[in-house]
Image: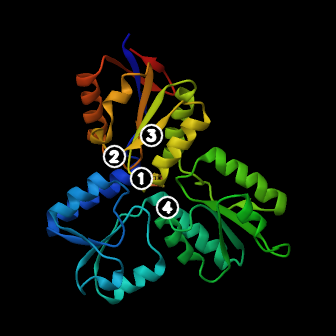
Amino acid sequence: MPITCYLLSPRGYCSGVTRAVNMANQVMKLYGSFYVTEDVIHNKVFVKQLMQQGMRKVDSIDDIPDGSTVLFSAHGVSPQVINRAEKKELTVIDATCPIVKSIQSEVKLASEQGKKVIIIGHKSHAEIVALMGYACDTKFYVVYNEIDIDLLPDFSDDEVVYFTQTTLDYSMVERIVTKLKERFPEIKSGSKNNVCYATRERQDVVRKVANGIDLLLVVGSSHSSNAKRLIEVAINAGAKKAILIDSKDDLDIAELNKIKSMAITSATSTPEELVQDLVKYLKEKLDVVVKEFSIENDAEG
Ligand code: SF4
């Protein structure tokens, strides 16, 4: 009996990552090298290729030689980093995703209006680190779970708005927002982009296929937030197992002989060729029938 393997769609690059990847490739062609302080996108394979071509990663904008070229990642940077780049007369290539940029503007505006700003997300994620810089004149709070919410001060005299990291599990965000509303009944969303469309679409198709499936393979890197969320979404929706792999080389093919059904998806920062390599490898090594699966038309033979 062949293994049924659902190839999920949409998967892989979102519009923000496609834009950042194109910019990085163009800058590399034009300048031969450039500096970054953050991975252009959260994918180890793509970043390794750029490093081999001449991209240099440093810890801080201050470590970049004056007059060099710097590329800001899709996750964005704080206004303080932009100021320091200007002082050092760096040539700046800004690959910040337009959705992230618009959230930065909304946080800045809310902050200028004196509102208390709550961000649902991971404190150490590049997107949140940058975002904090746009609320520098106001108190800014990052929460990720119910305990964090319990620890928030009392804002009863202030207008409170919340934003979210764009790559979270949106069902988890809904639970957190419900809890926030218990503490701050007047709290409002500060943005229409809370958890972006690309993250939602990839989670939706995983939710649809996951129930009862033996294995979900997510092609993506371990530091990719949206890749890790796809694993959680799959398990919560009933997948028996879900694992994250950078590429086909991480796979233990002997393990797969025991399964009857599987699905493959990839993070918004995963190059499609890694998925295609994986599918080719599975077809070579296993008796597997690959079916396209999307929200609109489910499985197609
Ligand atoms: S995941 Fe969403 S916010 Fe992040 S780069 Fe992609 S489109 Fe932009």
Residue with the mark numbered 1: 222
Badge 4 residue CB within 8 Å of ligand 1: yes
The tag earlier along the polypeptide, 2 or 1, is 1
The amino acid type found where label 4 is placed reads Val
Q: Quadrant of residue 123?
A: bottom right
On screen, residue 182 versus residue 2, left or right, reads right
Badge 2 residue CB within 8 Å of ligand 1: no
The amino acid type found where label 3 is placed reads Ile
Residue with the mark numbered 3: 243
Q: CA distance from mark 2 to mark 3?
A: 10 Å
Secondary structure type for disc 4: helix
The spot of residue 45 in percent (x, y) is 27, 52
The tag earlier along the polypeptide, 4 or 2, is 4
The spot of residue 265 in percent (x, y) is 41, 36
The amino acid type found where label 1 is placed reads Ser
Question: Which residue is found at the position 59% from the left and 61% from the top?
Answer: 121
Question: Which residue is found at the position 27% from the left and 53% from the top?
Answer: 46
Q: CA distance from mark 2 to mark 1?
A: 8 Å
Residue with the mark numbered 2: 246
Q: CA distance from mark 3 to mark 4?
A: 28 Å
Q: CA distance from mark 1 to mark 3?
A: 10 Å
Number of the label disc, if any, that sits on residue 100 = 4
The spot of residue 131 in percent (x, y) is 54, 70
At label 2, counting other C-alpha atoms closer than 10 Å, the crowd grade (few under 14, some 14-19, many 20 or more) is: some
Of tags 4 and 2, the one toward the viewer is 2
